[in-house]
Image (tube, grey):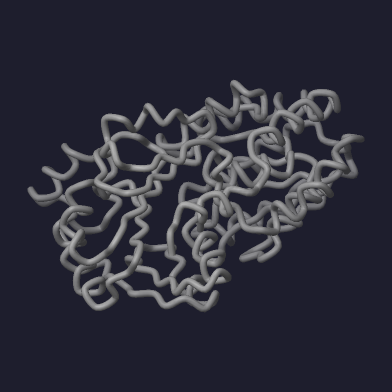
C-alpha cells in the first residue's frame, strides 16, 4: 500500500509506474490494477519451502520464507520483466530481499530505492527510506553504501493525500474528546483472527452505551464471516466494513482506534487518533514500542494478551477524556502527512 501511495503521487507528476507482485494469498494485484497501474505477476509456485535452498536462505534472512521463492529465482523472474522496461528507478519493498538480489538486477535499472523498516540486512541502493518514528540513519550505516541517501523518520511516512487534507478537521474535533465511535482495524487479511478476539474481549469492556463500533476488513479476510456473526452479538451497534475506500474520513470521524502496529500507524498519527495498538508480528515491535514511549498509544504486546489487557485499557480510556486528549496530541506530533512530497523530491525523474 505504501508503494501504491508513492506510485499515485509519481503518476500525478508524470511518472510511468509499473508493479511486480507475486500471487501470494490475499494479494492486492487487482486492487493495484483498479488504480490504473500495470502489474507484472510472478507465480506463487516456486521452490518448496522445506528445500535445502530455502534453509540456506532462512539462515541469512529472517523473513526469507515470505518471498515464495529463493532470491535467485525471484531475481531471474524479475530480470525478464526489467530487461524490457529498464526503469529510471526500481523501488523495492520486501523484507526477504537484500543486496544479493539488488546487485543481480543492477544492469536493468538506473537507480534503486529501498523501502525498509528493519535495518537487519545489507542493501546496495542509491536511496533508502525507513519511515519508522525515531529511526536513526546510523542504524543503516553498516548496511548501505556511503553514497546512499538515507531518509529516516516518520516525517517521511508515505501517506495518501487525503490524510493530510483531513488533518486539521480531525485534530479540531479532538479538542473536546468524545467516545462515540470506536474503530477496529487489524489489516486487510488478519489471517489469525485478531479482530474476532478483540470483539470477544470488548464484551467485557466499559464503553458508553451510545458508542458505535466500526470494524474494517478486506474482502479476502478468511475470518470475515465469523467476524460478521460476532458483530451481530455485540452490546453496541457494530458495523463490519469491507474494502472501504474512505479510510481517512473514517479515521478522522473516529474517537478511538484499536489497530495493528503496521503502516496504518502513521495514518492514525497524522489524524491524531488515539490508539490501543496490537503487535501482530515481530517486525512491528519496534514501531509499537517507540509509539508507546512517545505516549501516542497504549500497547497490547500480542494476540495472547488481548483478553486480559484490552478490557481494562478500554475502561481506563473511557473514564479519562484527558488521557485520550494527551494521546491524540502526542500522536499528531509524529507526522503531518507530507512524507510523499519529501520523498519525491529525492527521486530525480
Residue at 52%, 78% (x, y): give it: 36
Q: Is residue 236 above or below residue 328?
A: below
Residue 57 placement: quadrant = top left
In the foreground, 121 or 69: 121
Q: Position of residue 218 (x, y in %)?
A: 56, 61
The quarter of the rendered structure image containing the C terminus is: bottom left
Find the residue positioned furthest to the top: 293
**Residue drawn at point x = 68 percent, y = 57 percent:** 247
Q: Is residue 232 visible from the viewing direction of this image?
A: no
Image position of 284 (left or right of 307)? left
Q: What's the residue at 55%, 69% (across, down)?
A: 13
- The answer to whether residue 271 of the structure is visible from this angle is yes
- Report the front residue among 80 and 103: 103
Residue 52's place in the image compared with 299, above or below, is below
In this rendering, would 339 be left or right of 75? right
Q: Position of residue 74 (x, y in %)?
A: 21, 61
Q: x, y percentage for residue 149? A: 38, 42
Estimate the x, y position of residue 135 in percent, counting from the top left. Answer: 47, 30
Name which residue lies at 61% across and 66% down. 243
Amino acid at each position: 500500500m505504501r508503494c501504491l501511495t508513492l506510485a499515485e503521487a509519481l503518476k500525478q507528476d508524470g511518472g510511468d509506474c509499473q508493479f511486480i507482485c507475486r500471487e501470494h494469498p490475499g494479494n492486492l494485484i487487482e486492487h493495484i490494477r483498479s488504480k490504473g497501474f500495470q502489474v507484472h505477476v510472478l507465480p506463487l509456485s516456486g521452490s518448496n519451502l522445506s528445500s535445502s535452498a530455502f534453509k540456506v536462505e532462512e539462515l541469512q534472512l529472517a523473513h526469507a520464507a515470505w518471498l515464495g521463492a529463493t532470491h535467485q529465482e525471484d531475481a531471474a523472474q524479475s530480470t525478464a520483466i526489467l530487461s524490457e522496461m529498464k526503469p529510471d528507478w526500481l523501488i523495492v519493498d520486501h523484507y526477504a530481499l537484500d543486496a544479493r538480489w539488488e546487485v543481480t538486477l543492477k544492469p536493468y535499472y538506473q537507480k534503486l530505492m529501498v523501502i525498509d523498516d528493519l535495518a537487519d540486512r545489507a542493501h546496495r541502493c542509491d536511496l533508502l527510506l525507513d519511515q519508522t518514528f525515531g529511526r536513526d540513519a546510523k542504524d543503516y550505516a553498516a548496511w548501505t553504501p556511503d553514497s546512499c541517501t538515507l531518509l529516516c523518520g516518520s516525517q517521511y511516512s508515505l501517506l495518501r493525500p487525503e490524510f493530510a487534507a483531513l488533518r486539521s478537521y480531525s485534530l479540531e474535533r479532538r479538542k473536546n474528546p468524545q467516545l462515540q465511535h470506536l474503530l477496529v482495524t487489524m489489516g486487510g487479511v488478519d489471517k489469525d483472527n485478531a479482530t474476532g478476539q478483540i470483539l470477544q474481549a470488548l464484551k467485557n469492556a466499559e464503553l458508553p452505551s451510545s458508542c458505535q463500533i466500526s470494524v474494517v476488513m478486506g474482502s479476502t479476510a478468511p475470518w470475515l464471516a465469523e467476524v460478521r456473526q460476532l458483530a451481530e452479538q455485540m452490546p453496541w451497534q457494530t458495523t463490519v466494513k469491507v474494502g472501504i475506500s474512505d479510510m481517512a474520513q473514517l479515521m478522522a470521524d473516529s474517537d478511538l482506534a484499536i489497530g495493528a502496529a503496521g503502516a496504518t500507524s502513521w495514518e492514525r498519527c497524522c489524524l491524531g487518533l488515539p490508539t490501543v495498538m496490537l503487535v501482530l508480528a515481530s517486525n512491528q515491535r519496534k514501531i509499537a514500542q517507540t509509539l508507546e514511549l512517545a505516549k501516542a498509544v497504549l500497547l497490547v504486546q500480542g494476540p495472547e494478551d488481548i483478553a486480559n489487557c484490552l478490557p481494562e485499557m478500554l475502561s481506563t480510556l473511557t473514564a479519562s477524556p484527558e488521557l485520550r486528549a494527551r494521546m491524540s496530541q502526542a500522536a499528531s506530533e509524529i507526522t503531518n502527512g507530507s512524507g510523499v512530497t519529501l520523498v519525491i523530491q529525492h527521486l530525480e525523474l
